[in-house]
């Protein structure tokens, strides 16, 4: 669990129990992480004067490219 401490700090979690972990806990964490990242990104973008986006070739969801 110590390896996740930077993540918990970013998410402003004071305490995360090591008990009661189950198969879907990771997906629940990802959902909350996504929410926090979107919130933080929105604040950052709102406060800047210039935003640059790049598009790189990546593998598609169906692995076709």
Image (cartoon, rainbow, N blue to C red):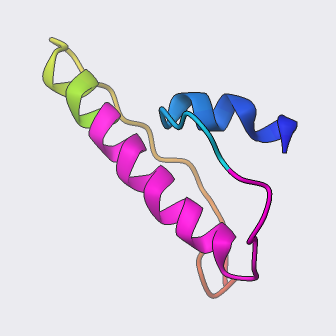
Q: How many marks?
A: 0
Determine which quarter of the picture holds residue 41: top left
**Would you identify the image quadrant in which residue 65 lies?**
bottom right
Say if 28 sits above or below 52 in the image.
below
Q: Position of residue 39 (x, y in %)?
A: 28, 40
Tell me which residue sits at (23%, 35%) in the image. 42
- Left or right of 44? Residue 15 is right
User: In the displayed structure, would residue 20 be above or below residue 55?
Assistant: below
Single out the residue that lies furthest toward the right.
2
Residue drawn at x 47%, y 64% as measured from the top left: 31
In the image, residue 53 lies at what x, y percent?
A: 36, 35
User: On screen, 19 above or below 64?
Assistant: above
- Compared across the picture, whether 49 is left or right of 17 comes to left
Q: In which quarter of the image is residue 25?
A: bottom right
Q: Which of 46 and 10 is in front in this view?
A: 10
Magenta segment, which residues? 17-40
Residue at 75% x, 71% y is 21
Residue 39 among those drawn in magenta: yes
Percent of width and height locating residue 33: 49, 51
Left or right, residue 29 beside residue 65:
left
Q: x, y percentage for residue 1?
A: 84, 45
Q: Which residue lies furthest to the top in this view?
A: 49
């Amino acid at each position: 669990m110590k390896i996740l401490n930077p993540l918990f700090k970013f998410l402003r979690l004071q305490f995360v129990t090591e008990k009661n972990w189950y198969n879907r806990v990771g997906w629940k964490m990802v959902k909350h992480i996504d929410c926090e990242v979107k919130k933080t990104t929105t604040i950052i973008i709102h406060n800047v004067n210039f935003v640059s986006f790049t598009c790189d070739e990546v593998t598609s969801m169906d692995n076709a490219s």
